[in-house]
Image (cartoon, rainbow, N blue to C red):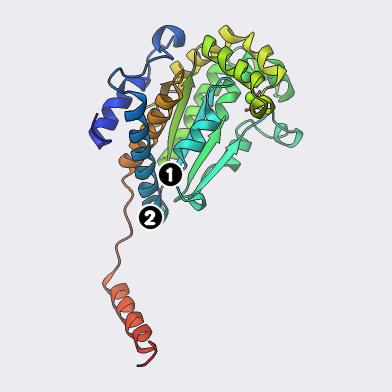
Amino acid sequence: MPDLGASEIAELIAPLRVAPGSKVNLPADFDPGYHAGFLNKRDGRRLLNRGVEMLSEYQSRLAAQDTYGLLIALQALDAGGKDGTIKHVMSGVNPQGVTVHSFKVPSAAELSHDYLWRYAQCAPSRGQIGIFNRSHYEEVLVVRVHPENLDRQRLPSAANDDGVWRRRYREINDWERYLSDNGFRIVKILLNISKEEQRLRFMKRLDRPDKNWKFSSADVTERGYWDDYQRAFSEMLSHTSTSWAPWYVIPADHKWFARICASAVIVNALIEIDPRYPKVSKAAHRELADARKALEAEAPGK
Ligand code: AMP
Ligand code: MG
């Protein structure tokens, strides 16, 4: 693969996209170890650098045009590589144009609102790229795997019946459609790791003093729910990959490959938005020329 042109990007990400309406069985349908055989790690580094450059260029145009925003929802199990992906993929972009929000267990104040409230508060403005490190999808993942989270949300009984997950999928799709109709493009990425790779990454967190802080014994407890999470992911992917906000399942056992894919998915969305620098009107051109004349007249020695 020589470079990251629009068609190479489209080719790279096509197999990662979840076709809207398809029924997904995550462990059977997506291989966490896949790395598009034709790429090696060194080529990978070059491609990632190119992706980072493109992202930076597009982000400047997005900000200048100030019409569209981009929301990136990043989901993964613990040690799936969310933090590293954000750090590497966004390394070249102007920090003024990017916001990152990490969603944790909801606070008492957040639990006093409807469940999408806290995510809406953090959505990007026009011209901005907003990253959700974990996202509104936790509401159909951790909340589904551990229903006591749902109890804490104090829903009225009619909103807490057997249909609650189906309804949440619909509400999330509707919210995303609303955002997308109003100029906010949504990119949804699931970093898909294998159980063995998660074990190895946990071991590294235990072995390396500089990584100890990242380990929590709760992570091992959560790992015990592996199959429940795979089922919750499968259901989420089956119901919420839409034409306006499709899911991409990124093979994440190889970090270098996951980062290239994440960067390709994000750049692809920006290529589709195609933000342009605003055109300067004739009147504004005249103003620029007048300003130049005035500044030149002030030059020392004139
Ligand atoms: P971390 O991303 O490792 O800092 O952990 C954040 C924790 O917050 C994870 O265990 C998530 O499952 C949890 N979390 C995030 N969103 C929610 C939510 N809406 N309800 C309950 N727990 C959540
Ligand atoms: Mg964690």
Q: Where is ligand 2, by quadrant?
A: top right
Q: Which residue is mark 1?
A: 182
| Observer-nearest of 71 and 89 | 89
Dot 1 beta carbon under 8 Å from ligand 1? no
Q: Residue at x 51, y 22 (%)?
A: 169
How packed is label 2: few (under 14 Cα within 10 Å), some, or many (20 or more)? some
Q: Is residue 38 above or below residue 68?
A: above
| Observer-nearest of 282 and 95 | 95
Q: Tag 1, which secondary structure?
A: loop
Q: Is residue 34 above or below residue 182?
A: above
Q: Which residue is mark 2?
A: 65
Q: Residue at x 57, y 18 (%)?
A: 201
How packed is label 1: few (under 14 Cα within 10 Å), some, or many (20 or more)? few
Q: Position of residue 20 (x, y in %)?
A: 37, 21
The three-letter code of the residue at mark 1 reads Asn
Question: Which quadrant is home to the N terminus?
Answer: top left
